[in-house]
Image (cartoon, rainbow, N blue to C red):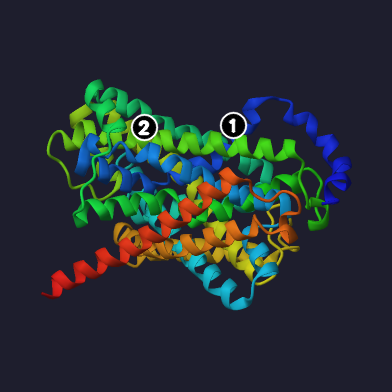
Amino acid sequence: MSGTKTRSAPHEPDEAPRKQGLLHSIGSGVITGAADDDPSAIGTYASAGAKFGFAFLWIAPVLLPMMYLVVYLSAKLGRVYGKGLFAAVRDRYPRWILYPAMLAAFVGNIIEAAANLGGIGAALNLLIPLPVTALVALAALAVFALQMLGSYRLLRKVFKWLALALFAYVGAALLAKPDPAAVLRGTLVPSFRFDAEFLTMVVACIGTSLSAYIFTWQSNQEVEEQIAQGLRKASQRRGATRKELERTRRDVIVGMTFSNVILYFILLSTGATLHASGQTGVETAAHAAAALEPLAGKAAGLLFALGIIGVGFLAVPVMTIGAAYDLAQGLGKKSTLHASFAEAKFFYVTVAIVTVVAVLLNFLGFNPMKALVWSGIVQGFSVPPLLLLMLLMTNDRRIMGPRTNGRVTNFLGWTTVAVTFAAAACLVYTLAAGAGAHGG
């Protein structure tokens, strides 16, 4: 692709900041990884740890290659093609494929944002004696102000610091003092049950860790990074050098490893405390934080709550901005955080509307955890086809030029596609079986 040489000139001025070293790339990669461990994901992992204890630890290393694969494909698409996921789908596929995929991702983002605002409010309520709905509104206002008044560079810096909140779960797990031998056995020896409860939790963890909002966000983050380097036109961003793709791969590996480690320590901390004490019914991340305190000490409960709050403030804007990216790109509208309000009115108005709707769902008696079930269903059905589209596009020379996938990436890709489609099928089966049992 000839775009590689034409891009070298605008890249040069911004290569210097990249020489600041690994810290910059770790920060960029960790933003997406931290957003993957949003409050709803924390609630899911805490529930799994409480229900099944150390017998569920093996799922973390199993999920890691799949988490890497989906985010890397998205990052690669944004880096090489120079457009976000739905802009690429719009360019390449007919509208009957574009619109259903776009709407599924858009609705999923709204529900996830609402649920996560509820999670922030519930966690803050453990520390501040105010009504949860009031705390939800204040949190949404703070997030929206940051989105509207801050530059992309400011958002990126804030997100990096918020990501550090997730290390609270490492501290919470260590304070729980788990048995090392039992931990090692649960991590290395898979324990699988074929009952509906266990299978549903496996599907929930797969759906949560591979959520569509993560890889739609990642493709757009790659584009925003290139615009920050002065490449404002899509034609300028087309193509990528091998060194750029190696850097992208490293960023994704760092970010997804970070996300997976946090997943592991959430399972570990709740398995060592709640499951061990017989408290197997955890419905929210805030519930887990409150339950940890008498078992592992006030510090563990406080760390768990602070982790929910910190990552919630990171994840909510990822979802509200992500929803705006999806809708604007699907409809062919301008979508970038580098544009002013006058330049991208549709994009910014969509961010505002999504934020308001997410808050209103909480005020209208919205139950975050019940909504997450429906969000999981939406994500469960939207992730496999979106992943399939990404795999096809990153193997299409009309889009990628010479930077199509290698054998290892394609092997991991098709394996992950098969697993996510199987997970969706299992979700249908468990829902149907549950409905049948209820009807009987």
Q: For the C terminus, which image quadrant?
A: bottom left
**Residue at figure coordinates x 26%, y 53% from the top left:** 199
The residue identified by callout 1 is 26
Q: Is residue 88 left or right of residue 231?
A: left
The quarter holding residue 98 reads bottom right
Q: Is residue 9 left or right of residue 336?
A: right
* Separation (CA) of disc 2 from disc 1: 19 Å
Give percent across and percent down for residue 349.
61, 66
Give percent across and percent down for residue 20.
71, 25
Towards the viewer: 397 or 420: 397
Give percent across and percent down for residue 402.
75, 50
Towards the viewer: 195 or 31: 195
**Residue at figure coordinates x 74%, y 56% from the top left:** 339
The residue identified by callout 2 is 169
Q: Nearer the viewer, mark 2 or mark 1?
A: 1
The residue furthest bottom is 96
Q: Identify the secondary structure beneath mark 1.
A: helix
Towards the viewer: 182 or 353: 182
Q: Residues within 10 Å of mark 1 (few under 14, many from 20)?
A: some
Q: Is residue 237 left or right of residue 302?
A: right
Give amino acid for label 2.
Tyr
Give amino acid for label 1.
Ile
Q: Counting residues from the N terminus, which is met first, the one under dot 2 or under dot 1?
A: 1
**Residue at figure coordinates x 83%, y 46% from the top left:** 4
